[in-house]
Amino acid sequence: GRRVGAARVPSGCRSWCASGCVDLATHRVLYRYPSGRVESVREQGRGGRSSRSKRLLTDTEEDSAERAGAAMSDAVSSFAGATSGVLSAAVVNPLDVARTRMQALAAPFAPSSHAVAPRGPSVVRVLTNIARSEGASGLFAGLGASSLAMPLFGATFFPLLEAFKPGAARLLGVDASSPACAAVAAAAAGAATEVVVAPLWVVRTRLQTQRMHAALASASGRGAAAAPRSYAGVADALASVAREEGLQALWRGLGPSLLCCVHVMVQFPLYVWLQDEYRRRNGLRADAAVPVGALVASAASSKVLASAATYPLEVVRTLLQDARGAGAGCGASARPRGAVALFAELARSRSLYAGFGANLLRAVPSSAVSLTAYSCIVDALRREPRAEA
């Protein structure tokens, strides 16, 4: 293949046109001439022989190729985000259930039952208790909602992130690859995605805690009638919440969720920066693929720091999502109704980081699987075809 600048263009995959070179495999304009019109040339080498065909590539065709390339990029981002979301949801669901229940029971106004869900336990004790009393169905409670929410989040967030970067760069007056631009674009993409996915997060939280509520009601002697309503699945939960509590209940906890966009402002730019640092220290090109081990380390490190910054908001969000109807959820009628009052109550009781250990055990593997899978899938789908021998 010929060289365009420092980049090598594989034979059989290029088209030289009036304004430069178009990669026929990915429809990307690889190089632009200042002006003028020349004939395009396509070469294919096979068995030691070569064939040449000539045609003109018009400006309209070039624009169409660029648009096709942009559409392909969005499709790759959506597919990679959705696939990585499914993988991470399945891997960490038992830890997600443990984290959610520890958050729900850690508040000072929540009831405790050491026989059912001991307060302040280790993650191992919580998981053991769930496995013994509820079996595998308890460990994977809410997986249906997670399997819908995580791919939807990934398929929405990553394309929006790329779409918002040019605007963020213009707004800040910086390069689109800068950490500041990545942080602003990640916050905007995260906020928009949270609005879309919020109903599934509410449903997931309630499906993960409903058996705990029933067990607490039974252990307290109040009977099953005192337990909150149980849902048969994702569809039943969505319909029941909308019918019994109003559509707005499906977005309960959205305020803390939007504030949690600080999470992606910290995590994603740090994840990208760590990869760039790895390339720089190892003398790699700026677009070179990073080894899987380095990707996992970058994803885990960025997730730990981001989680520490925003975890109290996640606790508030979980308790608001778990509140049922006009009551306070978790069988506590004295629960504060607003996010601010709830945050203050949790701060006074030193419960803002309840279940943080379980969250790290859940979130770090989830993020490592999700971001690593996303990067590997994008790299595989966007890899340019090799020249034929």
Image (cartoon, rainbow, N blue to C red):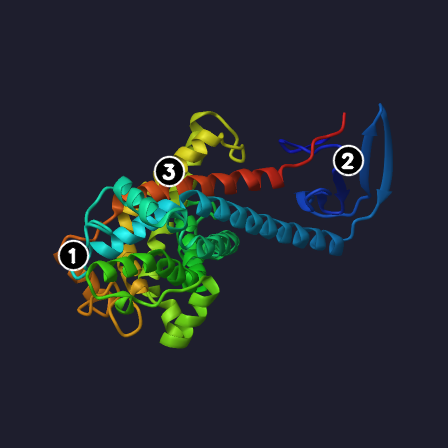
Q: Residue at x 69, y 44 (%)?
A: 33
* Quadrant where the image shows the N terminus: top right
Dot 2: what SS?
loop
Return the x and y of residue 374 as percentages of the image width and height. Answer: 51, 43
Q: Nearer the viewer, mark 3 or mark 2?
A: 3
* Frontmost residue, 285 versus 326: 326
Dot 1: what SS?
helix
Return the x and y of residue 4 as percentages of the image width and height. Answer: 67, 34
- The answer to whether the residues at label 3 and label 1 have Cβ atoms under 8 Å apart is no
Q: Earlier in the sequence, mark 3 or mark 1?
A: 3
Q: Which residue, given by chain and number where applicable, does mark 2 sit on?
A: 12
> Looking at the picture, which amino acid does disc 2 mark?
Gly
In the image, farthest residue toward the top? 48
Q: Residue at x 74, y 38 (%)?
A: 13
Residue 234, numbered label: none
- Can the viewer see residue 83 in this picture? yes
How far is the residue under mark 3 from the one under mark 1?
Answer: 27 Å
Q: Please state if 287 lies on the left or on the right of 314 as rendered.
A: right
Q: Residue at x 43, y 45 (%)?
A: 178
Disc 1 crowd, CA 10 A, few/some/many (<14, 14-19, 20+): some
* Frontmost residue, 193 versus 212: 212
Q: Which residue, given by chain and number where applicable, does mark 3 sit on?
A: 300
Q: Please state if 325 lies on the left or on the right of 332 as rendered.
A: right
The quarter of the picture where residue 221 lies is bottom left
Q: Please state if 306 lies on the left or on the right of 81 as rendered.
A: left
Q: Which residue, given by chain and number where applicable, does mark 1 sit on?
A: 347
> Looking at the picture, which amino acid does disc 1 mark?
Ala
Above or below residue 113? Residue 385 is above
* Quadrant where the image shows the C terminus: top right
Disc 3 crowd, CA 10 A, few/some/many (<14, 14-19, 20+): many
Disc 2 crowd, CA 10 A, few/some/many (<14, 14-19, 20+): many
